């Protein structure tokens, strides 16, 4: 097989593969024989159909499959051997069309367009400045988490008298116009509702202060204006609830109240494990430390965004733009040329940034190991569990969850990219001048507008 390369310009080449009969004949014959063994044709036992008939019916399709396989294999070997560093994937050439006449020829020409990765310099030093926005952990954030933890680890107790945040369980009975219980009307026993979900102030005032066994009559539609609330509470359909009106009688059977956890050693041990935190000051300091770690991730994210802007501009690399636009459309079935034209400026930055990250990683021996991925997965899962108040998950169990996460290719790639960004960010902080600026969360969020 004769393979040639034509340089169109610095960013684009065309690779031509001239395929002779000898390049594919043997593999096509083998494929035909294998197919003949499997094919079932009317009038012949499986494997006994005449080769001529198999060729006539399936020869062109098998030839096309084998040509594609042979061409793909030889093209990839050529690109590897010639050390041609390309972007995306080879695409059928538009300016120099292939010559593939399966009906009349035995020799074929396949031509492919390729976009080349550009060579570029990226000499970074302390003369290059990138801002780092350090987000301040405010006392109001700590106060909010203290309150949230107290609620999360609190307990539900039975109360004697209704208060505004309580849950009330009772029996609802529909009333007739004369105030008696309507025969055949809607009735719901052990119906549950939150006092703060009552719509009308006057009805809420009747319920607050009531005791177990008290009986209260009120207009159901005014008391619970939300149709979904009425339907769920009375265990009727949404359509029936929408039409429902008039007075109902509530007999209070039970009152439940959520009591926040007391801020003491039992709470500290429950959240962080025995003896990790031993005072209110240590508790608040621990919360502040955890917020600091989470906010540092956001700060690093912003740092990487700013680094991308600066380094892409500094590299000023030439990319095979038209080729890349074509490749994006081919690689994404639902993406149109119009879509690409609109979003290409940002896509172009991302292409350039990936090349810059690759160059930094290669030149500085930055690699992502299996242990790096496992640590990243464990940290992500730990963070998720901390949101539900589980801070002391056993390492063995955490590791098992992490391995399950890494078994999913998409999640594995996500963690790889995130870990690479972390290491690139760490390298940049040592290489360029980092100007640290302390900001509030509100000021930080404004940076993205």
Image (cartoon, rainbow, N blue to C red):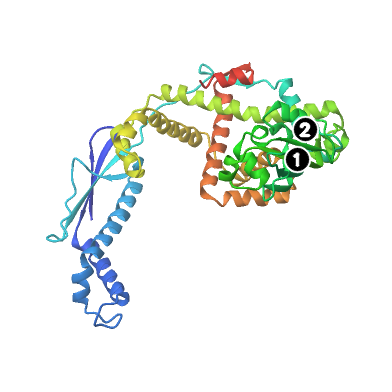
Q: Locate residue 376, reporting x and y percent.
A: 62, 41
Query: Callout 1: few (<14), some (14-19), or many (20+) C-alpha neighbours within 10 Å?
Result: many
Residue 207: numbered disc: 2
x%, y% of residue 117?
36, 36
Q: Residues within 10 Å of mark 2 (few under 14, many from 20)?
A: many
Which residue does the image show at 71% across and 26% down from the upper left? 201
Location of the N terminus by quadrant is: bottom left
Would residue 256 appear left or right of 37 to someone viewing this image? right
Residue beneath the point at 33% across and 50% down: 76
Instruction: Indicate whether 394 appears above or below 47.
Output: above
Residue 23 appears in view: yes
Q: Secondary structure at mark 2?
A: helix
The location of residue 112, given as percent across then percent down, is 25, 45
Residue 22: image x %, image y %? 21, 63
Q: Quick one: label 1 or label 2, which is nearer the N terminus? A: 2
Tell me the quarter of the picture where residue 20 sits. bottom left
Residue at point 60%, 38% (across, down): 227
- SS under mark 1: strand
Residue annotated with mark 1: 250
């Amino acid at each position: 097989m004769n393979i040639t390369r034509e340089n169109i310009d610095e960013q684009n080449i065309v690779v031509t593969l001239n395929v002779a009969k000898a390049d594919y004949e043997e593999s096509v014959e083998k494929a035909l024989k294998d197919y003949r063994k499997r094919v079932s044709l009317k009038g012949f036992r499986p494997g006994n159909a005449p080769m001529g008939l198999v060729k006539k019916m399936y020869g062109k399709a098998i030839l096309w499959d084998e040509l594609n396989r042979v061409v793909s294999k030889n093209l990839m070997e050529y690109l590897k051997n010639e050390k041609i560093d390309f972007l995306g994937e080879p695409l059928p050439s538009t300016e120099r069309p292939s010559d593939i006449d399966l009906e009349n020829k035995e020799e074929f020409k396949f031509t492919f367009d390729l976009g080349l990765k550009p060579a570029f310099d990226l000499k970074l030093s302390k003369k290059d400045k990138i801002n780092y926005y350090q987000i301040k952990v405010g006392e109001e954030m700590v106060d909010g988490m203290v309150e949230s933890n107290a609620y999360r680890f609190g307990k539900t107790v039975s109360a004697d008298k209704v208060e505004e945040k309580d849950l009330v369980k009772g029996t609802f009975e529909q009333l007739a116009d004369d105030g008696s219980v309507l025969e055949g009307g809607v009735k719901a026993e052990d119906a549950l509702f939150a006092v703060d979900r009552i719509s009308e102030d006057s009805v809420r005032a009747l319920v607050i202060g009531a005791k177990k066994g008290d009986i209260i009559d009120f207009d159901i539609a005014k008391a619970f204006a939300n149709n979904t609330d009425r339907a769920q509470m009375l265990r009727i359909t949404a359509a029936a609830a929408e039409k429902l009106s008039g007075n109902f009688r509530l007999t209070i059977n039970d009152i439940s109240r959520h009591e926040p956890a007391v801020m003491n050693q039992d709470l500290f041990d429950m959240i962080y494990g025995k003896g990790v935190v031993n005072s209110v000051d240590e508790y608040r300091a621990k919360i502040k430390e955890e917020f600091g770690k989470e906010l540092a991730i956001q700060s690093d994210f912003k740092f990487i965004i700013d680094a991308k802007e600066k380094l892409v501009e500094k590299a000023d690399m030439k990319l095979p733009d038209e080729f890349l636009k074509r490749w994006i459309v081919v690689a994404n079935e639902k993406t149109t040329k119009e879509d690409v034209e609109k979003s290409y400026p940002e896509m172009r930055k991302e292409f350039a940034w990936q090349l810059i990250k690759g160059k930094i990683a290669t030149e500085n021996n930055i690699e992502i190991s299996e242990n790096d991925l496992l640590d990243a997965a464990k940290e992500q899962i730990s963070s998720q569990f901390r949101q539900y108040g589980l801070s002391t998950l056993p390492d063995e169990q955490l590791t098992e969850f992490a391995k399950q996460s890494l078994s999913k290719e998409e999640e594995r790639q996500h963690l790889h990219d995130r870990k690479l960004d972390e290491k690139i960010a760490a390298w940049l902080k040592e290489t360029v001048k980092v100007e640290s600026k302390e900001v509030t969360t509100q000021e930080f969020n404004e940076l993205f507008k």
